[in-house]
Amino acid sequence: MTESLEDKVREAFAPEGALSRAADQFRERSGQTEMAMAVARTIDQGGVLVVEAGTGVGKTFSYLVPALLSGERVLLSTATKTLQDQLFGRDLPRLVEAFGLPVRTALLKGRGSYLCLHRLDTARHDASLPERGSLRTLAKIEQWSKATRTGDLAELPGLDERSPLIPLITSTRENCLGAQCPQFKPCHVNLARREALAADIVVINHHLFFADLAVRETGMAELLPTVSVVVFDEAHQLNETGVQFLGAQLGSGQALDFARDMLGAGLQHARGLVDWQQLVAGVERAARELRLVVGKQWPGTKLRWLGPSPEGIDPDAWQQSLDDLQHSFELAAEGLDTVSEISPDFVRLHERARQLAKRTARFALPCEVDSVRWVDVGSQLRLIESPLDIADAMRKRVLKIADPEAELEVDAYGEEIAREEPPPPEDGGRAWVFTSATLGDEPTLRWFTEPCGLRDAEVLRVQSPFDYASQAALYVPRAFPKPNDPAHSQRVAQLAAHGATELGGRTLVLTTTLRALRTIGDAMKQQFELLEAELRPEVLVQGELPKRVLMDRFREGASGGRAGCVLVASASFWEGFDAPGDALQLVVIDKLPFPPPNDPLVEARSQRLEAQGRSSFSDYSLPEAAVALKQGAGRLIRRETDSGVLAICDTRLVAMGYGRRLLAALPPMRRLDNESDFNAALEALKP
Ligand code: SF4
């Protein structure tokens, strides 16, 4: 009798199984095996499984092992390129070796991650490179381009991902020449896609997945119908990633990039045949005018756009600017059309001009149903139309893609790619697994399943194996300024500085706003000035250095001098910061992380719930805050041997009725009732 997948998985996780033979540190954990068995069942029977697996469960192995042992074709998607690299470069090879399986694995990123050989050629001739340092970087890239097999820029050591050169040596869907490209054969983007189509296990990221869903360009249209198992790790990010791609965007920066590319190609291939300067000036002027109509605004402002024009903007002037911009793209398209025979660059530029004209026209019409519009104001302007969630797209387009009959219609990349892979199994259908450490604050995980259109999914919650009551303590100071009190940030800084002085750094301060980040960072620096130099922790503030450098410095600080480091951070650090061991012993959260009520997307989501007769506070704001709080708190304990204190400086947590729901969402830490308990807990953590 052949062994079932569940049997194979159970054996692999057993005390004497393949995993314990392959990895010394492997120890059987009931939660990990429970999740792996559920994934195995879903793979066997098909369907949708949503698993919240608390920190320390080891969820990566829980889905990788059944996926690998199933022998099926698998698509794995995770949230970031770094996590993709980890999965592909570390976890997958370890398991493939442990099981001795002859599987082919491939890594596929968005085209912006790969060197574009054609644009590298063009950049060599570009006299207007952004700055002198760029020439040195370009020389380094050229050198590397001769040796790299993958063309993945992540392999290039020391390349700053914010370098202004990157857009000039990578392609976009708009400027890629596809099958017309002189470099089509050795093209890295093309190669990565071919390898993905031939592999058994393909690792992608959520951005790529949704970008493809929006424009069907990356080869996913061919890939998805051939896989039987799809796993989304870090699935809590799916909705917010998805809405960015499923709407429409038009930026003044896009218009200026287009103008620049048109001028470059025009002067290189068709000088004198068209008045390029005039066409470019037309686009640039129209983009500038649009920005001027919006007038002076604080950088980072989001202008609501509920009527014919954004709030506070004259509708006629706005409409006129959009018309002018559209007209400038149309004129550019006409000019480009006359020289399209000369170079494939012009064919693509022509298409791009038409797309931009079309998108501008879309923004001159009313907003789509169940979507929201706004304008992001910075040095550039971005017009955005976004769906409120991805539920509709997931139901109609992703889960429908599970049906092999519904696919295989488009090859947007310009070439048919032969496939020999069989269709997905007919007995069970495709298996979809969505997992993360945080997917909600109640048993049905509605926070995740509802906006993702997965309400009928099987849901499993696997508790963290950590003993939170003995490993961690929660302190909510009661005699503290209210969160909207001007003195609040100063007091947070005082509390964090006190803890960091006691612990020799090892403190992470998470703020809900950038303003608080700066105030707290400055105040802590000032307070430490009063200490003797050797006792003074270093204060690292988000934005002062790249994220990776900040994280490395923080970890080094804990192993170095007595004073150590404090990191004050916001946004992505709430969930992307990992400092296991005693490098991090105190996490201070300044305020409850409710979604900003005046954000147009948040506002529209709330209004929709109210219109349905539901409470936007308890059905949206509260679960959002609970999930974010859980993520922030999750930075503290990363291993079974870690210990530490979490301080949340928001008295609403204990003074308001809803505080109970938020507290219940946190891991079951022991409570510190007053300042002396807090001090005693800090004392106990000292080495
Ligand atoms: S096919 Fe596209 S991505 Fe590849 S080298 Fe040519 S322009 Fe660049």
Image (cartoon, rainbow, N blue to C red):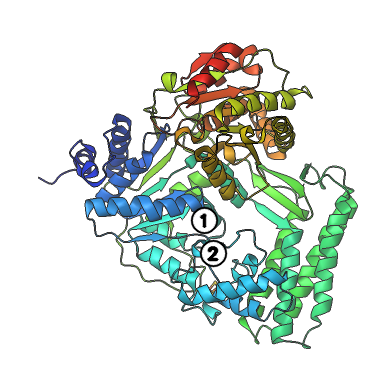
- In the picture, the quarter occupied by the N terminus is top left
The amino acid sitting under disc 2 is Arg
Q: Is residue 195 above or below residue 618?
A: below
The residue type indicated by label 1 comes to Leu
Extreme left residue here? 1
Q: Is residue 326 above or below residue 507?
A: below
Instruction: Give the number of the disc on residue 463.
Output: none
Determine which quarter of the picture holds residue 595.
top right
Q: Is mark 2 within 8 Å of ligand 1?
A: yes
Q: Residues within 10 Å of mark 2 (few under 14, many from 20)?
A: many
Q: Which quadrant of the view contains residue 300? A: top right
Check residue 111 in the rendering and tell me which mark sits there, or answer none: 2
**Residue 678 at what x, y percent from top left?**
56, 16
Residue 192, picture quadrant: bottom left
Query: Which corner quadrant of the figure contains ligand 1?
Result: bottom right
Q: Residue at x 54, y 64 (%)?
A: 111
- As drawn, 89 above or below 41: below
Tell me the number on the disc at residue 208. 1
Pick whichever, 62 or 22, lies toward us. Answer: 22
- Which x, y percent locates residue 275? 81, 82
The answer to whether mark 1 is within 8 Å of ligand 1 is no
Residue 93 in view here: yes
Q: Which element is circle 1 on?
A: helix
Could you tell me residue 452's position as x and y percent? Answer: 51, 40
- Measuring from the top left, give residue 608's x and y in whole percent: 66, 32
Q: Residue at x 43, y 29 (%)?
A: 642
Mark 1 or mark 2: whose residue is earlier in sequence = 2
**Residue at mark 1 to residue at mark 2: CA–CA distance:** 9 Å
